[in-house]
Amino acid sequence: MKFALSTLSTAVMTVTLMSFAASSSASANDDNMLSQNEVTPVVVTQIVDADNQSSPQSQKNRLKNEAVTTDIEASKAALNPRLTTLVDPITHKSIDNSYPLEVSSLLSLEQAQNILLQVSPKIAANQAAIAASEYETDALKTIDNPLVFAQVSANAYNLDADIDLSTLKNGIVNDINGAVDSVIPPIPDVPLPDFGELIGDRLPDSYNLKRSGSTTGAGLGVVWPIYTAGRTTALTGASTARTQEAVADSLLDKNELYNTLIERYFKAQLAIIAAYLRDDAYDTVQQVDHMAQRLFEEGFISRVDRLEAQSALADAKSESVNANNDARLAMMALQRLLRTDYRIKPSTPLFVSSRPLPDVSYFQDLALSNHPGLQKVAAKRAQAQQLHALSDTGYKPTVMLYGYGQVEKDPSWVAGISASWKLWGGLDKTASLASSNAKIRQADLSEIEVSDNLLLLVEKNWHDVNNAQSRYQALQSNVDLAAEVLRLRQLGLQEGLNTPIDVVQAQTQSLKARTEQAQAANTYVQSLAALMQSCGTPLAFNAYLNAADIRLPTLYDK
């Protein structure tokens, strides 16, 4: 029972279901040396948003098929399982937004590829990074929209203070006396009243101020940047370019995971073949040992020949056990990649195509058109261009409309337009432009370097595939010759013309030839997968697999 992680992609409006781990719910198999549990496979890949399916034609089809509505709803429920929180059987961590998913332990390569997309935490993490970058871009798109804000205030106050009025009082007295003297001329022997003192006596030397109360207010304001010299476009473009880089990184990781899957899948298949050949050799040596015992009892061979046959039997048994352990380990490596707690049994055989590959230039053109490494470089260049555009806006003004109104019985308001230039200070605009130009040049030169390395890598992998193909075909004569020698040695032993050790040596040579040919087939498969990965088209491997005319036997077959 696997479980999957749900991730929403805003760009294409689809819900991609990503499974994350597995737990076994299968029943035990019987007497196979490499057998494990099996369950019925349920492949859940993608569910399209229902709003995108409401076309007139689809509505007409739903009306026409009204009789099977129940079955359709049941199918939808099966493909859209309820999200919950499950525990990863490998790390034992709780994973939110998961759904159960059953996967068979007997998988073809194509099925394993589909499962890998659902169970890989790296792919799920990359999708989360892409979604986060897309949301950041969406957030930046509204940065130059009008900003409307409301303000509400409520205040309470209490004022209690003693105000010293003596200085003010003295000043008033002196001013009054001076004014009276300048207006009324002095009369001899007639004293004038002191007007300043008369008024000063009525003024206190201090005043105790006490006030308390509360106030409320509300207002509505707006700020609208009507001209930002392209800053918003540059920021949004840089964020979009970062999303493109995240997509390219995701493709690189996905292609690498495909290649890792092929490597482990067919290494497991090779290890199973090696274990089968070792078991076959052990059966043959057992027969030879049995015959050697009879010949020794009848006096046709010496005791030394008998002991050599027993020693060869012990060696064959040990090699058989080791080969079976290696096969289990290889299957366990495949199991870990697909995150199950039961071993995966590969059913797609090793293969070799006798047909020649297309010319290397065909694959080089594919690499230059499809490899995500070049897409990442292009995204880096786009980011540098947007940063250059952003730096260039430092010489241009910012124009804003603004307004604010107080919501009262007699409202007050203010509105206007402002333009601002940065004259000096902050980041050096000339240095910022030079830096962005250098980054653009870096991206251009990186594109040349990556292209050169890709072309060389494609050519190397192309030659590796051809070499593996030639080696496999050349080893066929060794396999036929070793099989004929073994057959003749076995007949010679029955006729008393050969010793048991002759048969064991012939069996060893036959085992070596068949193993080497299987290894050559695995080398061909791995080189072909590396070639497809270097072209940026890893799934094109499946087309060569389906068209192959030479297929090795496989222990597990559907």
Image (cartoon, rainbow, N blue to C red):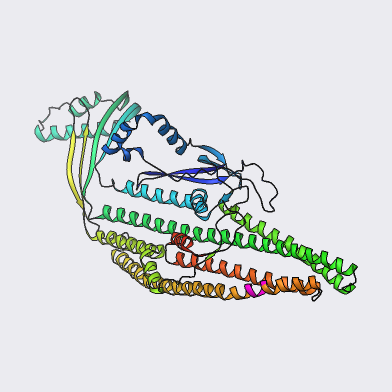
| Residue 199 in picture, x, y percent from top left | 20, 25
Residue at left offset 71%, top offset 61%:
279
Residue at left offset 52%, top offset 72%:
469
Does residue 103 lie above or below 84 as drawn?
below
Q: Is residue 33 magenta?
A: no
Task: Give the image quarter of residue 458.
Answer: bottom left
Q: Is residue 480 magenta?
A: yes
Does residue 157 appear left or right of residue 7 in this picture? left
| Residue 269 in picture, x, y percent from top left | 60, 60
Does residue 87 appear left or right of residue 415 in this picture? right
- In front of the other: 94 or 234: 94
Does residue 72 lie above or below 234 as drawn?
above
Does residue 241 appear left or right of residue 272 in this picture? left
Task: Give the image quarter of residue 247.
Answer: bottom left
Q: Give the dominant element type of the magenta stretch: helix, strand or loop.
A: helix
Q: Is residue 55 visible?
A: no
Counting the numbered discs, the total is 0
Residue at left offset 32%, top offset 23%:
213
- In front of the other: 475 or 405: 475
| Residue 161 in picture, x, y percent from top left | 35, 28
- In front of the other: 194 or 101: 101
| Residue 132 in picture, x, y percent from top left | 40, 48
Which quadrant of the figure contains the N terminus? top right
Q: Is residue 323 visible?
A: yes
**Outermost residue, front side:** 495
Part of the protein shown in magenta:
479-483
